[in-house]
Amino acid sequence: MRVTLHVWRQKNARSEGKLVTYQVPQVDPDMSFLEMLDVLNEELVGKGEEPIAFDYDCREGICGTCSLVINGRPHGPEGGAATCQVYMRNFHDGDEIYIEPWRARAFPLIKDLVVDRSAFDRVIQAGGFVSVNTGGTPDGNTLPIAKTTQEKAMDAAACIGCGACVAACPNASAMLFVAAKVSHLGLLPQGQPERARRARKMVAQMDAEGFGNCSNYFECEAACPKEISVEFIAWMNRDYLKARLTEPDTVTPGMGAKVGPSPVAGHDATAKKHPVA
Amino acid sequence: MFRSSIGRKALMAVTGFGLLGYVIVHMIGNLQVYQGPDALNAYAKMLKGMATLLWGARLTLLVLFAAHVYLGVALYRENRAARPIGYVRFQYEQASVATRTMLLSGLVILAFVIFHLLHFTFAAVQPEYAEWKDPAGRPDVYAMVVHGFRNPVITTSYVVAQLFLGLHLYHAVPSMFQSVGLKHPRYNPLIRTLGVVIPLVIVAGNVSMPLSILFGIVGTSVGG
Amino acid sequence: MELDAKVPGGPLETKWERYRSDVKLVSPGNKRKYKVLIVGTGLAGAAAAATLAELGYGVEVFTFHDSPRRAHSIAAQGGINAAKNYQNDGDSVWRLFYDTLKGGDFRSREANVYRLAEVSLNIIDQCVAQGVPFAREYGGLLANRSFGGAQVSRTFYCRGQTGQQLLLGAYQALSRQVGEGRIALHTYAEMLDLIVDDRKAQGIVVRDLRTGAIRSYTGDAVILATGGYSNVFYLSTNAAGCNVTATFRAYKRGAAFANPCYTQIHPTCIPVRGDYQKKLTLMSESLRNDGRVWVPKESADRRPPDQVPDPDRDYYLERMYPSYGNLAPRDIASRAAKKVCDEGRGVGEGGRGVYLDFQDAMARAGEAVIREKYGNLFDMYHEITGEDPYRVPMRIYPAPHYTMGGLWVDYNLMSNLPGLFVLGEANFSDHGANRLGASALMQGLADGYFIISYTIGSYLATKKAGRLAADAAACRQTEQEVKQRISRILSIKGKRTATSIHHELGKLLWDRCGMARNEQGLKKALQGIPALREEFWHNVSVPGDGDDLNQALEYAGRVADYLEFAELLCLDALTRNESCGGHFREEHQTLEGEARRDDEQYSFVSAWEYAGPDKSPALNKEPLRFQRVHPSERSYK
Ligand SMILES: Cc1cc2nc3c(=O)[nH]c(=O)nc-3n(C[C@H](O)[C@H](O)[C@H](O)COP(=O)(O)OP(=O)(O)OC[C@H]3O[C@@H](n4cnc5c(N)ncnc54)[C@H](O)[C@@H]3O)c2cc1C
């Protein structure tokens, strides 16, 4: 089959971008979407043209590296799949396919279809963990955890950090990503001591990164390759409000990941915003 | 707290909840139009009689309303800013029309509320209303209402506004629960049901009055 | 070259304990003065970074990925071993140790493996405390599953996403330190060379993939946790970005590369389709519990599978290994598949595939049971191939999956270059010639959480804190070389893509140095590789420049390293004139076609030393001495 692609090309963050049209004349329906782009790129490189930059790594839907808004849908037409798991069988001969990058202020574009998602890392750095050092932990079976609790925590923990939730949200909100982590850890007994603090810090950092607010469109849920439920957002809302109403004020917005001098000499402050100019 | 995204969404939900409560009470009060002039005018008189309560309620409403509108617009602007460059193609997957038009329906309701206040409360649209008294010497709210809704243009605008209110509530009711995190697998079906039933009841109740007046089912006692 | 494994004395069972009591410590106040550079944020790197930073060392972390969470460890599915004996089925540290050593065909260092088994106990506790949602029983306690090569149930898992959850645990621990300002994290940072001065590893040269900027970073020690090199075969189950660059560059700066020919080919992968694929997908080994592997008896038989009656089918694993049947170990199952396909009996595209058939299992247990057990795997297969495995048998074929070889390290996990430590899949230490399922995750976390924290002290305590200035001659020199190499690649402007050359290299290796190897084939490969290298350096096309994100350039640099490294791999395979584990030399097999080890002559680690361009590398041997175990023949009949 043959498809026509309209691909967002942009040399770097500073330059202007535009949609460029490419023909891919020989597409095997058994190809994955990314393999189809590989074939196009091979052709471009063979001609000495710069290939289309796009992110990928594991190609089995777990690393969260791949992205792409395909015909207006993050990760393309198949539900519950990352772009690398989308096959050309889902398209038809003669299709016009629009390929755009994740669009969000908090995800600055680096090149073509590649965006910088380090805002997610900074949200985790602000509080998405259980503060235990290595060693000295109790035996794994000390605390029994109900199977249902563990399964629910796992549903949330399945997040691959791809950013499709942000890309799909008309507000470019990161609530589903943040909620998944807040819920994963907040559901487990190990996460209790820091539960309130975690929710507050992560939300503060999320806000500081410039993501939008949640208007309950639930587009994130539809786009999530791991089908993480928006129920976790409700869960986080409650947890956060409870934390704000019952805990003393020690967290101010934006103070999540520390900015400023670090004891490690000579490094670029890692938690600064948008490291790419 | 109310600088955070979640805090403000919660505030949106709480103010919305307050306004919803008012809308329901307002509707129940107005439904007395079906009991005839005496009931409605007595009700209006009673309200007027409780000045502190009335003004307290009005003030609260004003604050709720202002906060709700302000937050709605502020969040909207922030959300636009969160995506400075939009998509050439974008396809919604599950957001309903109601969800996608919250700002629009909200603004229509705002405009309607202003019109409604001017119309009946301040009698600015039809100034003669302020003078009308019923046989008992009370302000003749009943006649005012009947007279107002015999005008097809006014009735139509009320009906349209109510449809927008319904649309707004169709998203707002379940959304309220989501935003403050009052959800539970056991009660989620109930929340979904409320999300349909509440807007339906409100729209039906509010629309029935002007329509039954327009079509001459109610208010025949009032002269042309 | 002197290869001192520095294995502590005393009985095997108490070596690690004694080591920990005796090792020199760095005082808390002094730790801050030392800086450790860590390359890689997989299980090994992230765990090490978090732990060392918690201890108070100055830590800088580098990954070429956009986030530490993308490391390939994220893709591990099955599980992680630990000798917890929660199932009360007779597991013990000794048993895990012995299984791992035997699984590795007695080609690993006994003391390292024993320590790994010991430390496995702590790993699970650590991960649970971090909030890793391991599968649980209804009673709330941890669940286990069984894995190949063991008779006990000791594998802990999180659905089919164990690697993901373990990595997120380590990533979160790392992130905590970043948030607290104790780790400087560099993403999009690809290490392109090692800075060696005064015969010590003192820093690395890094390219910022977004800006193309080349910079030196120096420290008191360098830790490489950069994963394995299966992608030298072009097609493997590894993520596209996995590479040999970091370890190979270190090799060229003097670190010994050990046992490069020990590569693991996993038997159950989805066969190659077309020539556009960049990677292959693993189908869990667990499928072989219920699926029966077969090919037609006759090579001319081209009937669709459902029309081949039972008598015309060859259930070859059941025939060849009656007691293990379809559950024969990985290396053995892989070779058997290759054998039947070589006979022309393979199925599917190019005749490179065998059936994995669930019809009997479905007839016996019902489709619902199979669906419940393997539903997600069946769906995945369906999605990729477009075929419904409930109706048509799956087609599978072996594919490169894991590399046991890696940089040589001593008991301290330090290479022969002082100051250079190597953790995880990047080192060679624990799996010998074959790795058992669910033990790579265990090793990565053992190295990162529980071993390096002690052993790095043994080096730093003897070293005065202080590092090379970033503009020292050694740094400038190394940077210069990196820059020259990049401009050379960009200036070729030839006709061929790096992909096509890599593809060709992969095919050559797969044919000559894949599941089965022989002298003649290896010699052919050793002739073919330099020619391909020539082709690359004269005819590769890498568009764009080096000043911003250039994925073609990144990739070409990795391919250039594979083109050199492949030669080392084949040379090692040629030199190791025996069969062991994943290294099968056709000349050395038993009458039944099984691998035949030669302990008399080959019970050693091959540690290759770079000798300079166009010179054959030097072979150094670390003899393997077994204190407690007597190597025996591995039989799975
Ligand atoms: C499909 C699949 C399934 C598996 N399932 C299991 C399983 O069930 N159980 C099990 O025990 N094992 C399993 N394994 C093996 C196991 O996942 C790996 O061996 C292990 O995760 C490797 O961890 P690592 O930390 O050594 O390296 P990796 O996780 O590969 O991390 C390498 C890191 O190094 C960085 N890096 C590499 N080169 C450079 C460079 N030049 N510059 C900067 N950074 C660099 C990368 O960015 C990355 O952060 C599986 C492997 C595969 C492929």
Image (cartoon, coloured by chain):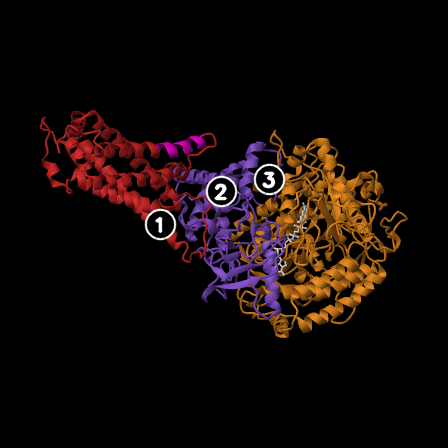
Q: Is mark 2 within 8 Å of ligand 1?
A: no
Question: Image quarter for residue C427?
Answer: bottom right
- The answer to whether residue A194 is magenta is no
Q: Is mark 1 within 8 Å of ligand 1?
A: no
- The kind of secondary structure element at disc 1 is helix
The magenta segment is: B187-198
- The amino acid pointed to by label 3 is Val
- The kind of secondary structure element at disc 3 is helix
Question: Callout 2: few (<14), some (14-19), or many (20+) C-alpha neighbours within 10 Å?
Answer: many
Of residue A206 and residue C295, the one placed in the foreground of this image is C295
Q: Which dot marks residue C465? A: none
Q: Which dot marks residue C128? A: 3
Where does label 1 land, which residue?
B76
Residue ID at (29%, 38%): B162
In this view, B69 is above or below C613:
above
Which chain is represented by red in the image? B
- The amino acid pointed to by label 1 is Tyr
- The kind of secondary structure element at disc 2 is helix
Which chain is represented by orange in the image? C
Q: Are marks 2 and 3 in contact (CB under 8 Å)?
A: no
Residue C95 vs residue A204: left or right? right
Where does label 2 land, which residue?
A182
